[in-house]
Image (cartoon, helix red, strand yellow):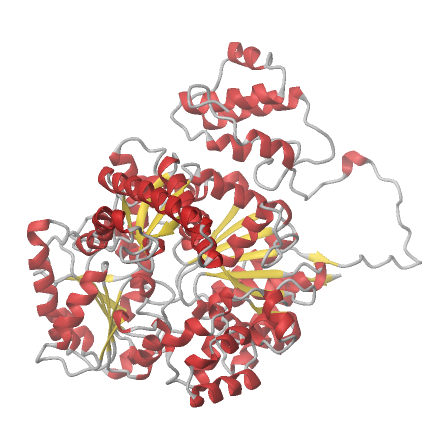
Amino acid sequence: MKDISKEIIDIFSKKLPQVFHSEEVRQNQVQMALDVADFLFKDNEKIMFVEAPVGTGKSLGLLIPTAIYLREKRIPTVYATATINLQNQILDKDSTVLESINLLTPREKILAQGKGNYICRTAFESNIDNFSEEEIEQIDKFFDNCNYGLFSELFALFPDFDTNKKADLALDKIRDRECRDLYPARCPGHTHRSLYTTSTKKLVITNHDQLIQSYLNSQNDNPPIIKLDHRVIIVDEAHSLKETFLGRICKGFNFNELPRPKSNLVPKRLKQKYTKTWGNLKKLNQKFANSDGTESNVRLNLEIEDINNLEEIRNLLDDCITALVLQAETNRNSYRVEMDLQNLEELNDKITTFIQSSDKKWIEKNKGVSFQRVTKKFEEEFNHMLEYLSSSSKIIFMSGTLTTNQPEQDIRVDWGMTKDWYIYKKYTSTFDLKKQALVYIPKEAVHPNREEYYHEHLYTMNRKLPELINLSLGGSLVLCTSNMYVREVTTALRTSHNINQKIFSQDDGDTQGISKSFKEDINSILVGSGSFFTGFSVEGEALNKLFLSKLPYPVHTDPYIELISKDYSDFESKRKKIIIPIMLKRLEQGLGRLIRSKTDYGLITIFDSRITQGSGPYQFIEKLGYRITSDLEEVKEFVNSPKHQKNLQLIEQFDENKLQIPNILVGKKPRPKSNIIVQRYQNPTSRVSTKREINPIKNSGIGLRRSNKPYTTAELQDWLIQFINSHGKKQINESDVSKYKKLKNSRAIYEKALEFCVDNGLSYHLVALEFPFDNASQRQSFRFIKPRGSGGT
């Protein structure tokens, strides 16, 4: 039989050092790989959470055991990331390591990016008049040399290609069939995307958006973008999955879809009134400018006057549609009129549905003002996706910042799961952060969120930045919590007489291009927010100074925060369970931008007076392993320490004896030799079973349905008693037990569990996650049952 644990240890301790030409073996990486293999081969749970900091080697720690699992069980892997950068890293680096140790072949992997990242030959030919002769020649050369048909390949070939012409090349507006009919096998983008679901692809490197959309397609009987059944699904950067899910299921329309006042679609008699109402809605842009005063907030709640303006616009569009109908009857330009009429009617339907729905509504900045809505059952919809994914596949959620100091509570709040449903593993940092980094809180820092101190905070930050940047050579990253801060800080640095370095800002354009330029100029400065808090990695002197404008608290009125905190009635509970954990996880992500390897060394500065000794954020930063100071002289001493200290290799010693090694044996047992007498019959009571016993009722949560026969009423009654004892403040008495034993059917038992949750201040969605359903059909029908008094079924 094959010893999988021994094979994994040999790969990391013998084969990988040869691949990387290094003697380093990461203890935590090997342990992670063993834990993942144990989860895949042996455990009955369908969900695993892996929390590991930078430097653990998370990707290979997951990919190697899943590749072995693929070899033994023929179960492919879907690897979903939140960023294109990480997708490219998995494809270009980690998957090639699997190839070098014979766990994968080049033909078995595929990069699956979103439609907007690919170039379409049909789109190019349709818009060929928009390109110069030189650009046409470049695009033709691209088609002849590209592997996937990606824009990134075009820009790698021709870095100066005009990015403003991406819309004339993008694949997202051309249907697959339309392109194949015109250019069979000649459009690399469509050809590559057609391979996503082929059985030969054993490692699909995708993103959160495609993962979620594939699930949504399955719910609407549409073909998935990528296959999700009978897979190992790895969700990297899992901390952002839920918010991405919101973006995929929300519906709405864009302000730019409205006809402009000067449009021929608006009759002359309506122009004055329409112009006024249209102008009122256009002013919503100003709300985003004003909101940047304290926090970056891409979602804003609608006010009553905004809804009134939408209703007025809808009424005016009704009049526009009536005028178009009369115009169509005269047969003047009938085809164009019919198209205009169809577009207006579709827009009017969107606005009507938006106004009349009881969904959560907001506006956001997305190519102009966008009006969005989503069901208030958002949490239930998210949990249903997890149920679906885990019904036939094993899922591994992985991130460096999944939880704060209370993992069980954080997973219950963020993912709707109790510890019976999953395996959770956390690994310590391989870095010596006390030696490699120093966190500086300037004494001059003021409270950044108080309106009266806002300008003083910004002034203090802009005044201190040049002094701190010039303490040493090397790159500086300034992370801001608002887009307005990005603009203000960038302007201040570019106009400062004390700054001679090249300054990049996320407002300059393409994020990937800016990141590349920043890495290449090791003494430059980059000012950014949002995506630069996570997934941005620069090693060495190109980034040795990190600045945070303030603690990254979310806005408590953000519609997303309101959706995920609706079960917490008072603000203090909402603050403790939702707002502070989100801030601490974002803070950890931001701090993690500096130290990316064991030879990195640098200074972190946070301009926030709320970080005082003994405060929650102070203790959190210390527990992460950092040293904190407010003494500028200590900062100068740290920055100017001898060069040999900065380059000190902090290599841990690998010790196989310290590993927790699971017993994973696969394959056929060897036949006994003929000269050995085998006892065929044994006393059953003498057997000692090492297999973990599973209670089918207790473990009937996500993905663990019993499908051989329905549960009996007695079994469901026992489940209800166990559920109440598990979640109640005290054990139930005998009279309650006899009362529950009188419940006659599964629906009555389900409703009683809902009633218990409401009476005890618990989220009634726990029931949908823990109830032992007989099958998927029953789960689907029961999930719309609500507690009595909350709106009915």
Image point (37%, 71%), residue name: 537
Residue 650 percent coordinates (x, y): 37, 74
Q: Is residue 565 visible?
A: yes
Front-most of 616 and 264?
Answer: 264
Residue positioned most to the top: 735
Q: Residue 159 occupies which quadrant of the picture? A: bottom left
Q: Is residue 701 left or right of residue 405?
A: right
| Above or below, comparing residue 592 to residue 716 in the picture | below
Where residue 258 sits in the image (x, y, percent)? 33, 53
The residue at 33%/70% (across/down) is 595
- Towards the viewer: 351 or 510: 351
- Residue 729 appears in view: no
**Residue furthest right in the image:** 674
Image location of residue 318, percent across then percent down: 36, 42
| Spot occupied by residue 78 in the image (x, y as percentages of width and height) | 58, 60
Taking 776 as reference, is 167 above or below it? below
Q: Given the current orientation, which residue lies at the most extreme front position?
A: 330
Can you say whether 76 is above or below 139 in the image? above
Q: Nearer the viewer, residue 544 or 504?
A: 504
In the rendered image of this protein, does residue 125 appear above or below residue 357?
A: below
